[in-house]
Image: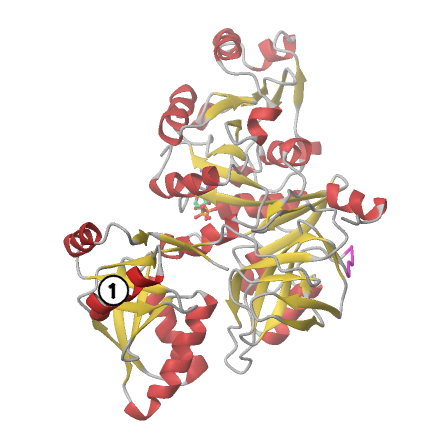
Amino acid sequence: MPELSSQTQKQIKRRRTFAIISHPDAGKTTLTEKLLLFGGAIQLAGAVKGRKAGRHATSDWMEVEKQRGISVTSSVMQFEYDDHVINLLDTPGHEDFSEDTYRVLTAVDCAVMVIDAAKGVEAQTIKLLEVCRLRKTPIITFINKLDREVQDPIDLLGEIENVLKIECAPITWPIGMGKTFRGVFSLLDNKLVRFTPGGEKLSDDVEVIEGLDNPRLDQLFPLEIGNVRESIELIQGASEPFSLERFLAGDQTPVFFGSGVNNFGVQDVLDALIRWAPTPQPRDAGKRMVEPDEAKFSGFVFKIQANMDPKHRDRIAFFRVCSGEYKPGMKVYHVREQKDMKIPNALTFMANDRVLMTDAVAGDIIGIYNHGQLHIGDTLTQGEILGFTGIPYFAPELFRSARARDPFKAKQLHKGLKELGEEGAIQVFEDELGNLLLGAVGALQFEIVAQRLATEYNVDAIYENTPISTARWLTYPDEQTKKDFEREQALRLAKDAEGNPVYLATSVYNLQTTQKHWPQVTFHVTREHG
Ligand code: GDP
């Protein structure tokens, strides 16, 4: 394979592409904002939450957002930190959009897991970590909210190890908590970083005390220091040492303690990212692995975001570059549609106005304006027939049928649902008679789709309950089995947005009975795109 120039290869090695995963309320937004603050990408805390405030419209991207009225600002943010380029991908917080989150996780090389120190490991964290582990994504752990009365840190590590089945290597250790939170001791560098509450200071304002036997510690915490020394020695003896190899294999997670809202411990996470997190990794493209430094451009769409402005129907396809270099106006090959297309003006997502970049390399995310020709999971190359794997669809658990209030708008509804299905906003199944059935993983998806049908397609949709309670994708060992099964089960069969056969079951019992009768047919709970 021809390779990129050594200069471009250096650019790739500077990249770190990651997402933050957490249960809602653990502090993901706060941490995102603080990371951007450290990266110099935003000047004021509060910018991420208060998107509408307008004071942070400093980048080109945000100009685009303002002009076009779209709100995908936080979907991807790129900023520089310590001579590295960090691509931070946002994951929707609400569990109803967990499918979106899973897809975003296919586009990263590393994840930061935020845990609320008072609540410990929560349901959504468990699910998301499972997905990361399937792909062996390396995980950095940030245990947040130490400024509150929280659980014993030893118990927290035990819980992470037991519930999430990942070994913990504490890198920092908290001294006290809540009102008596004094700071974190770096087990690796043997120094204490003192905690002072407050929101927006950067590292220069923080007091660092070298060595556990430093007399400054006796002076600062005369009553507690004996205990502190004892517990640090204990944890140093009892915990696993950090292993870069085990971390990269996804078997061990380095653990940091801090308080996002107080800007404390955040820089440790950034430093770990550039020190330890992997550079853009090779990707499985079906028939072969694609290396990031191959000269030819390739990558895949992992997310499609609608333009929120009803006047502009176009949407943005978020595309992970896996190899080669994106250049404005370049021609690429759309593998699924088997034809060339041009990417005239992809968006790069700089949350920083000091650097202007017109090209993108492996690890970067570009946004491609899209009128429906790109679907989730689509691969673009420079001619080679590849298909990047691993982007999941999950069997929905909630179903509704949809019809237009105005029967003359049936066609419009059909079109809208098909497009929204292709985009991945909801799953759309069509039975033999052409009836459309909607399947969702979370109930909110139905609401969003109804809203979008109204604003973007001008259709008032009415949902109705259906007897369907679960779905499975089907594969057959041979044509004859397929024919026989289709004849017997015609009423239970449908096709998804990409035309794949799906079995619609009225109950788990119904599903099991059919499975028992048809052991040759495989019923899949997930389907990969492409
Ligand atoms: P998300 O839902 O995971 O994005 O969580 P947010 O970042 O929105 O945080 C949820 C709540 O926890 C907010 O009220 C934050 O102000 C609060 N929070 C975040 N970090 C900390 C922290 O370190 N200490 C305390 N006490 N509260 C925090």
The answer to whether mark 1 is within 8 Å of ligand 1 is: no
Quadrant of the image occupied by residue 511: bottom left
Question: Which residue appears farthest toward the bottom when viewing the image?
Answer: 408
Per the image, label 1 sits on a secondary structure element best described as helix
Q: Position of residue 445 (x, y in %)?
A: 36, 64
Q: Residues within 10 Å of mark 1 (few under 14, many from 20)?
A: few
Q: Position of residue 275 (x, y in %)?
A: 68, 31
Tell which of 393 and 304 is nearer to you. Answer: 393
The residue where tag 1 is placed is: 484
Q: Position of residue 256 (x, y in %)?
A: 54, 28
Q: What is the total number of numbered labels drawn onto the structure image? A: 1
Q: Is residue 466 above or below residue 381?
A: below
Which residue is rendered at x = 45% and y = 56% of the image? Answer: 100
13 sits left or right of 261 in the view: right
Residue 339 on the magenta span:
no
- Magenta highlight range: 354-358
Amino acid type of the residue that numbered disc 1 sits on in the rendered structure = Asp
